[in-house]
Amino acid sequence: MPITTEQDSAPRISRIGEDSGGFPMKAHNRQEEQFIHLVRLAWDLHKRGLSAAVDLQRGKEPILLVTRPSGPLRVMALVLNGTWFFTWGRGRDQRVRALAGEAAERVWEVAR
């Protein structure tokens, strides 16, 4: 039986572009990336006390439905000129960069 050290039993931290086994990860298509951004936002909103669900209707873009008294807020993740945004309307004031630190805060304010 081989001798193991504490270092051997430590969880492996994967590098960007690898899965937890060290194998290259496949590239995500646009809808998979949308889903990842929306799930991250849903979790951040959940931590702030809001309910949210990702809606994956067949043949449509994934959206995040955020529960609010006046009806669900529909949030989409879109890429514009190579940058990901969350948007909940058509105006410039109705979007925020998906990776911005204040993204969940902005959506939370609109949903309250």
Image (tube, rainbow, N blue to C red):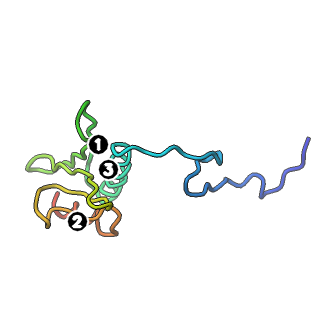
Q: Residues within 10 Å of mark 1 (few under 14, many from 20)?
A: some
**Residue at (33% x, 68% y) in the render:** 100
- Image quadrant where residue 16 sits: bottom right
In percent of width and height, residue 44 lies at 34, 58
Residue at label 1? 54
Q: Residue furthest bottom?
A: 101
Say which of 34 and 3 sits in front.
Answer: 34
Q: Quick check: 26 above or below 45?
A: above
- Nearer-N-terminus badge (1/3): 3
Say which of 4 and 95 sits in front.
Answer: 95
In percent of width and height, residue 14 lies at 61, 54
Are circles 1 and 3 on residues that touch, CB within 8 Å?
yes
- Nearer-N-terminus badge (3/2): 3
The quarter of the rendered structure image containing the N terminus is top right
**Residue at (26% x, 39% y) in the render:** 55
In terms of secondary structure, where does tag 3 sit? helix
Residue at label 3? 38
Report the mark closest to the observer, 3 or 2: 3
**What distance separates the C-alpha of mark 3 from that of mark 2?**
14 Å
In terms of secondary structure, where does tag 1 sit? strand
- Image quadrant where residue 105 sits: bottom left
In the image, taking residue 86 as reference, residue 39 lies left or right, namely: right
Q: Residues within 10 Å of mark 2 (few under 14, many from 20)?
A: some
Tag of residue 106: 2
In the image, taking residue 3 as reference, residue 43 lies left or right, namely: left
- Nearer-N-terminus badge (2/1): 1
Amino acid type, residue under disc 3 in the picture: Leu
Say which of 6 and 100 sits in front.
Answer: 100
In percent of width and height, residue 10 lies at 71, 55
In the image, taking residue 94 as reference, residue 45 lies left or right, namely: right
In terms of secondary structure, where does tag 2 sit? helix
In percent of width and height, residue 69 lies at 11, 50
